[in-house]
């Protein structure tokens, strides 16, 4: 063993090896402050008082919450700007006087030939002025720590930056042995075993991403007019880049290289490119190549699940679905998911795992290359087996979503199969699952149609019908049911196609798209007539009648409802008979046939009560209340309204309860305080049901009632809440109408 003994030399110039920081670091002020807080020197266990009043670290309002540490590690997705943050913070710390010098090394941790620990120690020892050093890595590490201690004894502090580390092992021996120097690491992994201050870096906020593009273009050419003429197109470009700094810099470079190209033209090319990843390449930097380096570090089981995650039809995935994809128990799936999060290839929020848009593109390309290899590449038996297995996994995932949806919807009290024991404890648990998986469930319909799983594409929209109407998600219902119509037609499944057209007509009616609804109902009627299915034809006529009434055609609606009731009396379908009678009553009211309206509504409520259908019973009782009111029977009308409220609460659906309360609040001759009471309860129920538009309507109604009661100040408060909610929903006309009410009160 060679031992070198020497006196510490004067601080060599090699201890100023920190590369230049970027000219601008957009949107990272908080992160810079946090890194500086970690780097801040400590004397006798406390922050050095010499540094308390100056330097960038003083900008951190939460500095005391982040005491200085020996090691800090910045983790994040490839291309997210970890090195830029480290260099910016490093230079700021040096300028603030935290350090007398710096050591920097790029460990190339994700390259095919990463820097070995011994090589890194050799580079640092040479920078420290050591010319002869031992061969053994542990001995080099000991000498490295000795040199750092000697500098510390001279009152000299060093910032050591280890960039692009792939693991804790690659940097563990680079840790200084005392509390004077600081080690700052960047890695695509979260290095949780280093006892370090960890900072996970996310993509930029949209405004910061636009600022980065703006600065990059003007840095290259201060006269570039594209920047000043294209604020919205820059926002679109930032979005297409997923606000990932690497993608943003590449896009800026592409624009710089083609000064005649507009930002809108680049956006169009990027949006329509067969592969965004192929497009995001400026000749020196490429997003795909950067992701490749991370992917190659994955073990086979982790790489397999990473690829399969792209097959998930929605933006995120739960543990049980991920386990189905991986074909492993949930406990094992959690371990694999955790490792992908640690590698910053996945994000995890509230036990839901998701991918950055560009990472998902990358995973999709990997999955697609297995299922559809390039024509010039011959696929051997193993490749065919891998493609078949991937298709099998996707089918199992879609089946998982469809089967669990059946069990969840059964808990809503709808006409679905009974749930298996312990699938869902109660209605709230079922609703929570449906809400969490809504995007995956609707996406499963499109995915099933695209991959030839026609049974799922046709049947799942039927299962989801009750949930989507329960929550009022009619746009989703229109989307999935349109697919079901197309696939059922292609498959020659006439009964399924007819049912899908009827459901589509109802959804279109709820969305006030009446002309489209009429065409859908006509198609359903034609199909059910050809199938000689009178009962289903009666259901279609009932839906058609409602659409006709709501679109201002009550006479035509009356004929449709009367025919529907007649058919249902013959077929003996009590539920459909009750539904048709309720709608018939509404149409009679529209035509001012008060006696007929009361009779039909009363019979409908009685039938729903016999069937135990509390939600529809509440609706029929509300219908009856207004029919009685129109006849001048006000006390009987209030009694019917009270019965409706009892039934709606028994139904257990806050949306039904809210609608019933709002209906009751509209009764004539109701005292303002009673009206306010109903509307306050309705607003609370809307909030529970996540029915924001109806909630805003309730708030506006409370404001109107308060004005009537003479409570103008309180009215202004509720009008203001309604206006803000309408604005958040993008309902500008409603917001403006409420604004007029506020202005009138303030005039």
Image: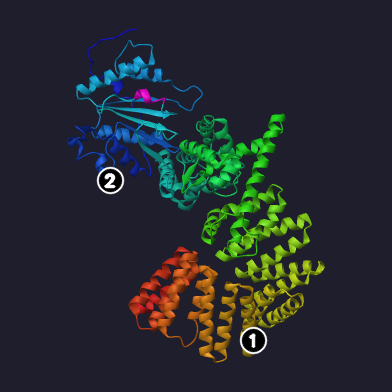
Position above or below: 656 against 203: below
Q: How many marks?
A: 2
Question: In the drawing, what numbered circle is on residue 327?
Answer: none
Residue that appears at 29% across and 24% down: 177
Q: How far, Cα to Cα, is label 2 from label 1?
A: 69 Å
Quadrant of the drawing holding the C terminus: bottom left
Residue situated in front as seen by the camera: 628 or 419? 419
Question: In the drawing, what numbered circle is on residue 599?
Answer: 1
Residue that extends furthest to the bottom in the rendered view of this protein:
632
Q: In the visual, does 499 lie left or right of 201?
A: right
Q: In which quarter of the image is residue 746?
A: bottom left
Residue that extends furthest to the front in the rendered view of this protein:
421
Position above or below: 526 against 395: below
Q: What stretch is highlighted in magenta?
A: 169-174
Residue situated in front as seen by the camera: 3 or 9? 3
Quadrant of the drawing holding the N terminus: top left
Question: In the drawing, what numbered circle is on residue 62?
Answer: 2
- In the image, residue 734 lies in the stretch drawn in magenta: no
Disc 2 is placed on an element classified as loop
Disc 1 is placed on an element classified as helix
């Amino acid at each position: 063993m060679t031992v070198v003994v020497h006196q510490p030399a004067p601080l060599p110039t090699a201890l100023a090896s920190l590369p230049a920081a970027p000219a601008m670091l957009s949107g990272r002020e908080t992160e810079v402050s946090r890194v500086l807080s970690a780097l801040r020197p400590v004397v006798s266990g406390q922050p050095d008082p010499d540094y308390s009043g100056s330097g960038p670290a003083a900008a951190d309002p939460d500095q005391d919450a982040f005491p200085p540490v020996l090691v800090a590690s910045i983790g994040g997705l490839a291309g997210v700007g970890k090195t830029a943050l480290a260099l910016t913070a490093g230079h700021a710390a040096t300028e603030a006087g935290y350090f007398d010098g710096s050591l920097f090394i790029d460990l190339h941790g994700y390259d095919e030939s990463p820097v070995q620990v011994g090589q890194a120690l050799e580079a640092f020892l040479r920078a420290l002025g050591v010319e002869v050093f031992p061969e053994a890595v542990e001995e080099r590490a000991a000498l490295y720590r000795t040199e750092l201690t000697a500098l510390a004894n001279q009152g000299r502090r060093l910032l050591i930056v280890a960039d692009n580390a792939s693991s804790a092992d690659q940097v563990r021996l680079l840790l200084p042995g005392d509390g004077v120097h600081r080690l700052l690491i960047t890695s695509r992994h979260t290095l949780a075993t280093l006892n370090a201050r960890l900072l996970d870096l996310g993509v930029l906020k949209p405004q910061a991403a636009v600022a980065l593009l703006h600065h990059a273009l003007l840095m290259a050419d201060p006269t570039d007019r594209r920047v000043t003429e294209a604020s919205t197109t820059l926002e679109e470009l930032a979005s297409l880049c997923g606000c990932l700094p690497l993608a943003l810099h590449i896009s800026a470079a592409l624009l710089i290289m083609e000064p005649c190209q507009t930002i809108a033209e680049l956006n169009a090319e990027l949006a329509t490119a067969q592969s965004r990843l192929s497009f995001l390449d400026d000749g020196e930097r490429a997003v795909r190549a950067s992701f490749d380096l991370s992917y190659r570090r994955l073990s086979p089981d982790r790489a397999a699940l990473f690829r399969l995650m792209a097959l998930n039809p929605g933006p995120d995935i739960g543990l049980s679905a991920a386990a189905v994809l991986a074909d492993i128990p949930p406990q094992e799936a959690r371990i694999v998911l955790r490792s992908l999060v640690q590698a910053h290839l996945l994000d995890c929020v509230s036990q839901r795992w998701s991918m950055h848009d560009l990472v998902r593109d990358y995973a999709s390309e990997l999955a697609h290359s297995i299922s559809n290899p390039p024509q010039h590449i011959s696929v051997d038996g193993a490749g065919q087996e891998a493609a078949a297995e991937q298709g099998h996994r996707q089918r199992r995932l879609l089946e998982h979503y469809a089967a669990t949806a059946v069990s969840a919807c059964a808990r809503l009290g709808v006409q679905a199969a009974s749930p298996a024991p312990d699938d869902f404890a109660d209605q709230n648990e079922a609703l929570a699952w449906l809400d969490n998986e809504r995007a995956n469930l609707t996406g499963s319909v499109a995915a099933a149609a695209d991959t030839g799983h026609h049974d799922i594409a046709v049947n799942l929209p039927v299962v989801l019908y009750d949930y989507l109407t329960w929550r009022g998600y009619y746009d989703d219902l229109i989307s999935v049911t349109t697919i079901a119509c197309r696939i059922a037609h292609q498959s020659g499944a006439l009964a399924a196609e007819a049912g899908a057209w009827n459901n589509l007509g109802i959804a279109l009616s709820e969305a006030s798209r009446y002309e489209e609804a009429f065409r859908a109902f006509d198609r359903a009627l034609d199909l059910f007539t050809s199938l000689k299915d009178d009962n289903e034809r009666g259901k279609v006529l009932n839906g058609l009648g409602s659409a006709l009434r709501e679109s201002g055609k009550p006479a035509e609606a009356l004929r449709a409802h009367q025919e529907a009731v007649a058919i249902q009396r013959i077929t003996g379908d009590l539920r459909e008979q009750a539904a048709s009678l309720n709608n018939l009553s509404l149409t009679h009211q529209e035509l001012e046939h008060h006696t007929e309206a009361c009779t039909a509504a009363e019979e409908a409520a009685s039938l729903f009560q016999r069937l135990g259908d509390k939600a529809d019973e509440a609706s029929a009782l509300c219908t009856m209340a207004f029919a009685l009111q129109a006849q001048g029977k006000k006390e009987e009308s209030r009694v019917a309204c009270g019965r409706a409220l009892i039934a709606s609460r028994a139904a257990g659906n806050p949306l039904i309860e809210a609608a019933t309360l709002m209906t009751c609040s509209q009764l004539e001759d109701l005292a303002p305080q009673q009206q306010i009471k109903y509307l306050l309860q309705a607003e609370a129920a809307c909030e529970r049901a996540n029915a924001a538009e109806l909630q805003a309507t309730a708030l506006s109604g409370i404001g109107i009632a308060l004005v009537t009661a003479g409570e103008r100040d309180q009215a202004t408060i509720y009008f203001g809440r309604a206006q803000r909610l309408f604005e958040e929903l993008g309902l500008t006309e409603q917001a403006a109408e409420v604004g007029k009410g506020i202005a009138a009160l303030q005039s």
